[in-house]
Image (cartoon, rainbow, N blue to C red):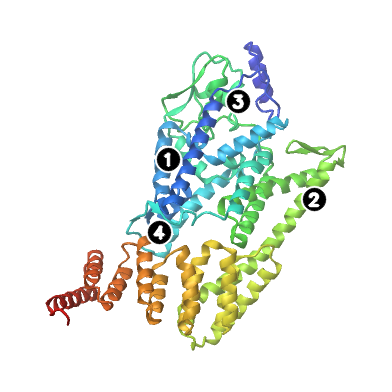
Amino acid sequence: MAKTESKKAKKAGCTTAGPPEREGAPPTGIRRSRSTRWRIGVLLLVHAVLAAHIAHWARTGSALSPLEPSEAMEFVKHDVVNAGLVFFALTLLSTLVLGRWFCGWACHLVALQDLCLGLLKKLGIRPRPLRSRALALVPLGAALYMFAWPAAYRLWSGAAFGPVEVELTETDFWGTFPPLPVALFTFAVCGFVTVYLLGAKGFCTYACPYGALFGVADRFAVGRIRVTDACEGCAHCTATCTSNVLVHEEVRTHGMVVDPGCMKCLDCVSVCPKGALYFGFGPPAVGRPAARRAKAGFGRGEELALAALFLGAFFVFRGIYGVVPFLLALALGGIFAACCVACVRLLRRGEFSFASVTLKRAGRLTAGGRVFVALVASAVLLAAHSAFVQLEDGKSSRAYAALLPLRGRLLDDPAHVPAPEERALAETGLTASGRVERFGLLDSAENSLRRGWFHLLEGDGASFVRELERAAGERERMAPELYGVLGRYYAARGRPDEAMAVLERALAERPEPGDADRLARLYWQAGQPERALAVFYRALTVHPDHPDLLFNLGVAQASQGAFEEAAASFRRVLALQPGRREAAENLEGVLRAQAAGAGAEPGH
């Protein structure tokens, strides 16, 4: 196919940039794209806006919830409309008009991939795109798993839908994001390694679930790259395209680019020597097949192997040690599958190159080949080890889930004796979680948490406290909740000083209503009503409309003789919960006491 195109171009008297199928060959005689600098400027502006968003949250403690497409999952899971859902919906709607523009002009991961591609080119490396039909299905499968499967599962399980809640702001901004080291590793793998090993925009092509949905919407878009009669088929556009689109073939066949992989970066428009390409509006691409790309680089057996290796690696790495997020697991799965199949090819062939490196020459492994085999072998061993850890972690998780209804009783009733089957479950979970701790490569806060509960069920309170404190140290975001649990544990066992200490730590990081109420009660019982009231006021700055906090504050104010303030608190409760009888009764009592006090003689 490449040779045919080259001959046609020569007959037309055109200067060619070399066959577009020769991935990795540097284009010659092609002018620099002028749209690149504009796109870089826009992407820098996007990152500046993100930084301003984060800075606003850091300064005020509240901001719009993260404008991440993944946040839209809260709607299909929990009927929550957040800023991420609104943003994603608007972006999809705009794609129906402008085409798949967001990926090229506003996505931070595309910016990272383009940066990596530019750096590799400066080093003389032009990554060759992987051609796999099996891995190309991953993005759409991931999108369906994220946004369709939760709704389907709710329907199947008979769970009720609604009512819809609107939560456009967020106080725990980083609550759904991985820790910083994991985020940086994710950016390195998804933004850089995928480009080097899978080709330009490798993550977009073989992992990104959002790109898959944008690609579907792009088929219906009226805004597309189109062509005039000035086109001479020189293929400069195809040689320049970093999305691996056969631009010159598509405009020749359809008069426009129909490939949903086109991100409207406009590089092809900018480099066209005849000015024949432009972005314009017209018929959509529905029913028009994309131009056939280079022949797939894998046979049927290899495609099946790629699919199996990807699925295996994805499920093995996803969520391991509680740190590997979904998108990172997708990227790792694709990289693992491609490298394993490449290693098999390397061992079977006399000559072999991969990722712009010659790994085998004249039947002998090069130094790079030996390093590559060692790396793949290490990755396979890591995957096998991770599979073992995941299996044991699964046993521990299932035991923990089965014992979940028992947690409240274990905390609040020190005399409770678990049933024999419950103790057997705890022993099974403790054994499995012990193996995770002993053989795992990283500490896991979730595993420490589960071990703590298993110890408590077996009557070992000291180990319960130790494991929960360890979990709090391993995962800062879990710390406030765990300190609250420890406060409840200490309070039920008559250890108020320790309970107050850990509850203060919990409220210092995240004032939760239940923890605030428990701490205020402890201060009240300790004869410190001023500190109890201060706890309520502090929690209400974060949860100003929490009816239980307001009700308990009213009770505390009334007991201190602050009838006017107590009446205001009870009125606020009734405004939030008009049918709350005890609030109405307390308000009536406070008003009577206030009236009696006003009618008393001075000095009495």
Q: Nearer the viewer, mark 3 or mark 2?
A: 2
Q: Are marks 4 and 3 in contact (CB under 8 Å)?
A: no
Disc 4 crowd rating (10 Å Cα; few below 14, some 14-19, many 20+) is: some
For the C terminus, the image quarter is bottom left
The one nearer the camera, 46 or 355, is: 46
Estimate the x, y position of residue 193 in percent, counting from the top left. 66, 43
Q: Which residue is mark 3?
A: 238
Q: Amino acid at mark 1?
A: Leu
Disc 2 crowd rating (10 Å Cα; few below 14, some 14-19, many 20+) is: few
Q: Which residue is mark 2?
A: 374
Task: Name above or below for residue 37 compared with residue 531.
Answer: above
Most extreme residue toward the front is 603
The one nearer the camera, 326 or 285, is: 326
On the question of residue 154 being in view, the answer is: yes
| Mark 4–mark 3 distance (CA, rounded to whole Å) | 44 Å
Estimate the x, y position of residue 235 in percent, counting from the top left. 61, 21
Q: Which residue is mark 4?
A: 78
Secondary-structure class at tag 4: helix
Among the two numbered marks 1 and 2 on one chain, the one whose residue lies closer to the N terminus: 1
Secondary-structure class at tag 1: helix
Among the two numbered marks 1 and 4 on one chain, the one whose residue lies closer to the N terminus: 4
Q: Amino acid at mark 3?
A: Thr
Q: Amino acid at mark 4?
A: His
Among the two numbered marks 4 and 3 on one chain, the one whose residue lies closer to the N terminus: 4
Q: Amino acid at mark 2?
A: Ala
The one nearer the camera, 467 or 187, is: 467
Task: Name above or below for residue 233 compared with residue 560.
Answer: above
Q: Which residue is mark 1?
A: 92
